[in-house]
Image (cartoon, helix red, strand yellow):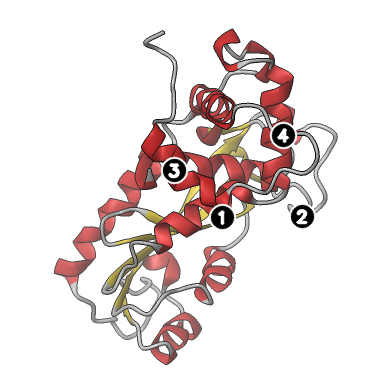
Amino acid sequence: MSDLFWLTDAQMARLEPYFPKSQGKPRVDDRRVLSGIIFINRNGSRWRDARKEYGPHKTLYNRWKRWSDKDIFAQMMAGLAAERGEEKTLMIDVTYLKAHRTATSMGCQKGGRGRLIGRTKGGMNTKLHAICDSQGRPLNLFVTAGQVSDYIGARALLSSLPKVEWLLGDRGYDADWFREALKDKGIHACSPGRKQRKTAIRYDKRRYKRRNRIEIMFGRLKDWRRVATRYDRCPRVFLSAIALAALVIYWL
């Protein structure tokens, strides 16, 4: 049917090197199962509402959960992204993702630990921290609870930054320690200073305008309903949903 999603042969050929080896009984049709998983994540449907063309919904969910626990989808995105390395400019930013009541039930640990869901003025949220290249394609993703500072995500993503010339970020990343860490890596920080600073921070305003590409990236990721609204209790599974969306939109 025309409204169904199917991976092409070329796309499957790019993904196959990242498939885990089958142990014991051979897996069922990879193309059918993965296409069904993508369809569910893009449309935000329940697993039991999967179209019959994709096979039993339990098969789809079991594959999704098992591969998410092994970070297979995140490895696919990182692997394909690494094939097109960025040499000049990176961007960093953060966005809020609304947590559905099914993800926040049974109580969260104090401080947002465990499920990485926190309470903010907008309700229960998870924060998505991202690094993207000069074309607005995601390279690395990290999730925290909604009330966690942007600096926490920046610190976590810092070690994975490739060797480039520039890193674009908004005022939320204006910290002396962060600028010094980038300088040690040979990266120039291009971000405005906080209004509380006594001395103004000089930055390339013309280059900074390109940062809208990471905002566009967040918007495209949120077109996937299981990304825009978090239904998964497990943060690793939710991060897999985000990585899968990034993989399909940008890297396949």
Q: What distance separates the C-alpha of mark 2 from that of mark 4?
A: 37 Å
Dot in front, 1 or 4: 4
Q: Return the mark for residue 26.
A: 4
Disc 2 target residue: 113
- Label 1 SS: helix
Dot in front, 2 or 1: 1
Q: Which residue type carries mark 2?
A: Arg
Dot in front, 2 or 3: 3
User: Would you say the residues marked 3 and 4 are in contact, meaning their CB atoms lie under 8 Å apart?
Assistant: no
- x, y percent for residue 65: 72, 37
Disc 3 target residue: 13
Looking at the image, is mark 1 or mark 4 earlier in the sequence?
A: 4
Q: What distance separates the C-alpha of mark 2 from that of mark 3?
A: 38 Å
Q: What distance separates the C-alpha of mark 3 from that of mark 1?
A: 16 Å
Dot in front, 2 or 4: 4
**For the view shown, which residue lies furthest in the right direction?**
106
Q: Residues within 10 Å of mark 4 (few under 14, many from 20)?
A: few
Q: Which residue type carries mark 3?
A: Ala
- x, y percent for residue 148: 62, 59
Above or below, comparing residue 180 to residue 22 in the picture:
below
Disc 1 target residue: 75
User: Would you say the residues marked 2 and 4 are in contact, meaning their CB atoms lie under 8 Å apart?
Assistant: no
Looking at the image, is mark 2 or mark 1 earlier in the sequence?
A: 1
Q: Which residue type carries mark 4?
A: Pro
